[in-house]
Amino acid sequence: MPNGQQDIKVYFPNEIKGGVYANNMVVAHTKEEFVMDFIMLAPPEGAVTARIVVSPGHVKRIFNALAENISRYEASFGTIEVAEEPKGTMGYMN
């Protein structure tokens, strides 16, 4: 590989290959990390389907990758309409 790059093989566990669905997300942060809770809302309740914790530097790369992919998508398929915010308030329960 050029410039001393190496091939990195990534293992993809069978139990997550199908992914999870989320129709909402809550983001929080500290100085050291961003926490993104992906939620499946089906009123009157919902469930967190995934929690992702990343460094500020990595969340910036995620942001840039999403922006680039949204631009490509819209160039191919047209403008994406912003989804309506869910009505009501959300709170976590144990």
Image: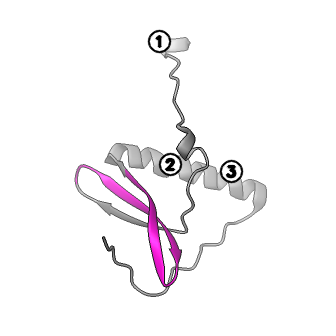
Q: Which residue is mark 1?
A: 4
Q: Which residue is mark 3?
A: 72
Amino acid carrying label 3: it is Arg
Label 2: few (<14), some (14–19) or many (≥20) C-alpha neighbours in 10 Å = few
Label 3: few (<14), some (14–19) or many (≥20) C-alpha neighbours in 10 Å = few
Secondary element at image label 3: helix
Q: CA distance from mark 2 to mark 3?
A: 12 Å
Say if the magenta span includes residue 40. yes
Say if the magenta span includes residue 45. yes
Query: Where does residue 49 sit, x and y in percent of width and height?
Result: 47, 61
Q: Residue at x 47, y 48 (%)?
A: 62
In the picture provided, is 71 more to the left or to the right than 90?
Answer: right
Residue extent of the magenta highlight? 31-52
Q: CA distance from mark 2 to mark 1?
A: 25 Å
Secondary element at image label 2: helix
Q: Which residue is mark 2?
A: 64
Q: Residue at x 75, y 63 (%)?
A: 78
Amino acid carrying label 1: it is Gly
Secondary element at image label 1: helix
Amino acid carrying label 2: it is Asn
Tell me: residue 76, above or below residue 10: below
Query: Where does residue 36 sit, x and y in percent of width and height?
Result: 39, 58
The figure's colour scheme reads one colour
Towards the viewer: 43 or 71: 43
Towards the viewer: 63 or 27: 27
Tell me: residue 42, above or below residue 64: below
**Which quadrant is home to the C terminus?**
bottom left
**Which quadrant is home to the N terminus?**
top right
Nearer-N-terminus badge (2/3) = 2
